[in-house]
Amino acid sequence: MDGVDAWLQAIAASPWALAGMAALVFADAFLVVIPGEAAVTAFGALAVAHGTPPLGAVIVVAGLAAFSGDLCCYLVGRAVGVERWRWMRGPRVAAALDWARARLERNAAVVLFTARFVPFARLAVNLAAGAARVEPMRYLGVAAVAAFAWAAYQAVIGAVVAALVPGGPVVAVVVSIVVAVGIGVGIDLALARRARRRAAARAS
């Protein structure tokens, strides 16, 4: 355990630590399998357990990376649409994009904000927002607020867990990641259940 603790401390103190976290968060905007949330939560825990990197720096860097990734998705959607590549026409992705387009027509600001907290919806909504030509200044404002709110939320989860859970940095990081993943899975399940209920109601 002491060896792992020393390893975590070395990572936290590395000048490349926040750059690595930012790379994961940026990639997470395109690839939902990338553990962007877990990285931010882990660094939030390290900020409290080790005192480095500073929690504020974790939030700012994660927010900038999240905003940059979302903006790139928006620009891709704006440039090529949502049917250019084969993976966009797959059943699951196509359904998600259709859902995103329908929601954006009703309330773009709310959908853009909340989608940042749901991995697969995040990708679909940003691509659809670009394809639908959502006004750039409006998109930039909402996306920026959502990105920094998401970053603060993820980092604070890690910080709170590190402050409350005994056992040192290793335990704090592991528990904070489990909590963050659990919350994400819970949100996904709740949204899926809600979608099934709505589909059943329309069919009846």
Image (cartoon, helix red, strand yellow):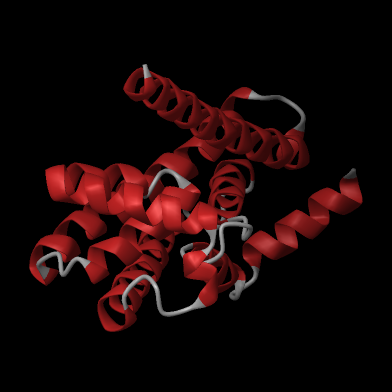
Residue drawn where x is 44% and y is 30% of the image: 191
Q: Which one is nearer the viewer's eye here, 185 or 203?
A: 203
Q: Is residue 76 visible?
A: yes
Q: Is residue 122 visible?
A: no
Q: In x, y percent, where is residue 62?
A: 43, 60
- Relative side of 35 to 27, left or right: right
Q: Residue furthest front?
A: 204
Splitting the image into 4 quarters, where does residue 195 fall?
top left
Q: In x, y percent, where is residue 163?
A: 57, 29
Splitting the image into 4 quarters, where does residue 7 fall?
bottom right
Which of the image's four quarters has the N terminus? top right
Residue drawn where x is 49% and y is 24% of the image: 193
Splitting the image into 4 quarters, where does residue 166 fall?
top right
Q: Residue furthest bottom?
A: 79
Residue drawn where x is 73% and y is 39% of the image: 174
Q: Which one is nearer the viewer's eye here, 24 or 176?
A: 24
Q: In x, y percent, where is residue 39?
A: 60, 54
Q: In x, y percent, where is residue 108?
A: 16, 49
Q: Which one is nearer the viewer's eye here, 121 or 181?
A: 121
Which of the image's four quarters has the C terminus? top left
In this view, 17 is above or below 197: below
Q: How many marks?
A: 0
- Relative side of 153 to 143, left or right: right
Residue drawn where x is 56% and y is 64% of the image: 31
In this view, 190 is above or below 184: above
In this view, 179 is above or below 85: above
Q: Which one is nearer the viewer's eye here, 38 or 28?
A: 28
- Relative side of 176 to 79, left or right: right
